[in-house]
Each structure stands twice: as structure tokens, then as C-alpha cells.
Amino acid sequence: MLFWHVPAPNEALLISGSKRRAQNTQFRIVTGHGCVVLPIKQKARVLSLALREAQVVEDCLTKQGIRLRVRAIAAFKIGDDPASIANAARRFLSEQSRMEELVGRIFAGHLRSIVGGLTVEEIIRERDRLSQEVKEGSHVEMEKLGIVVDSLQIQEIEDASGYINNIAAPYAAAVASQARIAAAKADQEATEREQQAVALKAQYVRDTEIKQAGFMAEMEEAKARAAQAGPLAQAKASQDVIGEQTALAEREAQLTEKRLESEVRRPADAEAYKLRTIAEAEREKTKLETEAQAFKERGLAEANRDATILATEAEANQRKMLAEANAEAEKVQAAADAQAKKTTADADAFAQRAIAAADAEAMNVRAQALEGGNQGLIAANKLVDLLPAMVEAAAKGIAGSNLTVLNGADGVSDMVASMVGQGLSIYDTLRKAIATTPPLPDATASNGGLVSGDGSRSEVPPSIPSRSD
């Protein structure tokens, strides 16, 4: 029928959209019989319960640090119970083709973990134990995935380092030695029997020859005991015995040499090969450790060297910058000192010139005042005498003060000229004030003369010449 679905014996039908639920699942699980699936409302999917196998090929490190490649095969399937089917459906329904890969990875991880706690000898001799421990270790993960492991077999153990061959070498050598010993014993027994047969044959021949010699001796004795047949027969018999004894001794020597070859020389060669292999392994290990230590020390030395170079460069740059700053400061200080000295010299020279000019002007004014006999001019003369002192005091104040002068020497000249101009302005003001002051009543006579301190009169010129600046 169109709506009737029947799963195969190795399949489980999963129906979602149904209100019927079992064991807290969100879908209905049908195995072994058919059911009706309503279109649109319900959706049916098939989960295979067939047996699957996963190939595991993993490189593992044993407890001894030896790398082995282990090949194993795992046979598994999804469990038949509803819980297992539900767990597997939630994880693999859309990716059933990847179940082998995922299970193989899980087994590979547990295989690496378990092999890491075993020695090579335990892995070789107890493969069933290794398989059982891997199955037990992965049981929890498999149960969560709804998978049942039917079988896990270790197929092959590959050893690239030759450790397994070296383990088997003493046993193979022992078996080969026992085989050679058995062969030597068989040869010895055969040789002994051959020697016994030869001895019996020789004895028979000797007896026969002795008898024949006896017969011949009797015949010869009968012929008047001629040619000493008896002694010759005895010497010949002794020679045969010596030859047989020599051959026996040679065979015993050969047998002894073979016994030494199988019991002494071959085991000694095997032991020497084993010791040589171990020594070479130790030498390689020491070489690798030495190279690692040298690389580490070389790295530390290079780091220290780089740090020293950086520190040296930083210190050199700091010293260079300090030297440049000091040189620039000294240069600026020298320029400032030179400019200050030049300014001071210019100020002193200008002050001296101003003092000389003031002295000359004062002398002229004093002369004119004395010639006219004017008391105002006499007072102005006193002011003229004080003017150089005022200019000199101003110049000294400027020379000793800490002033900022702009425009260099011209600025100093302008400042001094301004000071002198102020002094001359004061002088002119005082002179005008004195000129406008009326003369004293008792200071003049009818003839326009001046009365001196002793009552004598002096001639006064009609007008006092005025000096215009």
C-alpha cells in the first residue's frame, strides 16, 4: 500500500510527527513489522542495523617510547534495543556513511592510550588483552552512540625501528643453535655407528687376514719358516689399526670444531651484535642531547649579544645627544657672554663720550656766566657740574643692572642717548626757570652792575646770551 511501510529485518523505521512516543523519545521506532505513515503529517526514515566494520591504522608510542603501527579491525552495529536505536538515530541518521570513520577514530584514540601503558613484549604476547581493554575503554562512548561492538581484532603490528626483530633474534638464534646441536648430535651418532661398523669390518678383515696370515705362516713355516711371514702380518695389522685410530681422531676433532661453532662462536656473535646495536642507540641519543644543548646555549648567547649591542647603542646615542646638547649650550653661553661684553663696552664708551660732551658744555656755560656776572648762570653752573655725575650714575646703574637690551649695541646707544637727553631737558627747564626769575633789589646798581660780597660792583653786560639746544 502507499501509506504502509515495512522495514527490512536489519533496518529500523523511524517515524516523526506522531503523537505516540515510547521511552521519552521524540519519534516512534518500528522494527520487525509494518505500520501506516500518514503523508505530510508524518515522516518516515530508515536506519540500518546491519553489521559494519571499521579499519584502524594508528601510529602508537609504547611505554618504552618505541613507535609501532597497529592495524586493527572492529566489527560493530547499532544495538537492537530502542534506547540504542534512538541514540544512533539522533547522531547518524543523516550521516550513516560516516559511522565507520567516527567509530574508527574513537577506537584509534583508545588504542593509542592503552598501547602507551604497555611494553612491546606485552602487546605481542597479549593481543587479546589489548583488544579487550580497547573494547572496555570505548564501552561508554559506544553506549552513548547506541553502538554495540561485536569484535575487535589486532591484525598486524609493524615496527619500523626493528625492535621486534631484535627481540626475536635471541630466540631465533637459540632455536637455530638447538637445531645445529641436534644435527651435530645426529651426525655424531651416525659417525659413531659408522665408526663402529668400520671397526667391526676392520676387525673382521683383520681376523680374516690374521687367519689368512696364519695359514700363510703355516704354509711358509712349512716351507722352512721362510720370509718371516708372521712378523710381517703382525706389522701390517698394527699399521691398519693405527690408520683407523688416526681417522677416528680426525673425525673427533671435526666434531669438536662444529660443537664450538654452534655453542660458543654463534652465541658470542649474536651477543656482540646486540651490544653493538645498544651502543649505537646510546651514541645517537647522546649526540641528539648534545646538539640540543648546544642549540640552546647558542640561542642564549645570541640573545645576550643582541641585548648587549642594543644597550651599547642606546648608551652611545644617549652620550652623543648629551654631548651635542652640552656643546650647543656652551655655544649659546659663549655667544651670550660675547654679546654682553660687547654691550658693556659700548655702554662704557658712550657714557664716557656723553660725560666729555657734558663737561665741555658745562665749561662753556660757566664761562659765559662768569663773563656776564649773572647769578642765575652761576646757579646753572652748579647744575652743569652736577649733570656729569647724574649721567655717570645712570651709566653705572645701566652697566651693573640685569637688563634685556633689544637691537644689540644700537639698542644700548639709544638707551644712553635717552638718559643724556633727559638730563639735558632737566637742565634746560632749570635754566629757563632761572632766566624768568626777577633780579634781587640790592643786587643791581644804577649803572646795571652787580654787587659782590665785599660791596664792590662789577659791570653787567646788557644782555645774557642764551644757549639753544
Image (cartoon, rainbow, N blue to C red):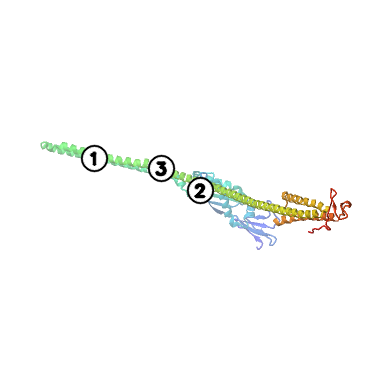
* Lower sequence index among marks 3 and 1: 1
* Near-viewer residue (389 or 360): 360
Q: Secondary structure at mark 3?
A: helix
User: Which label belongs to residue 272?
Assistant: 3
**Relative image position of residue 173 (x, y in whole percent):** 41, 44
Q: Secondary structure at mark 2?
A: strand
**Would you say residue 196 is visible in this rendering?**
no
Q: Secondary structure at mark 1?
A: helix
Name the residue type under label 1.
Answer: Gly
* Lower sequence index among marks 3 and 2: 2
* Lower sequence index among marks 2 and 1: 2
* Near-viewer residue (367 or 206): 367
User: Does 217 sit above or below residue 144?
Assistant: above
Task: Sort mark 3 into few (<14), some (14-19) or many (20+) by Cα contacts within 10 Å.
Answer: few
- Side of 89 where 418 appears, left or right: right
User: Does 240 sit above or below residue 160?
Assistant: above
Name the residue type under label 3.
Answer: Ala
Task: Sort mark 2 into few (<14), some (14-19) or many (20+) by Cα contacts within 10 Å.
Answer: some
Residue 266, quarter of the rendered image: top left
Q: CA distance from mark 2 to mark 1?
A: 63 Å
**Relative image position of residue 405 (x, y in whole percent):** 72, 54
The residue labelled by disc 2 is 67
The residue labelled by disc 1 is 243
Task: Sort mark 1 into few (<14), some (14-19) or many (20+) by Cα contacts within 10 Å.
Answer: few
Q: Nearer the viewer, mark 2 or mark 1?
A: 2
- Side of 403 where 59 appears, left or right: left
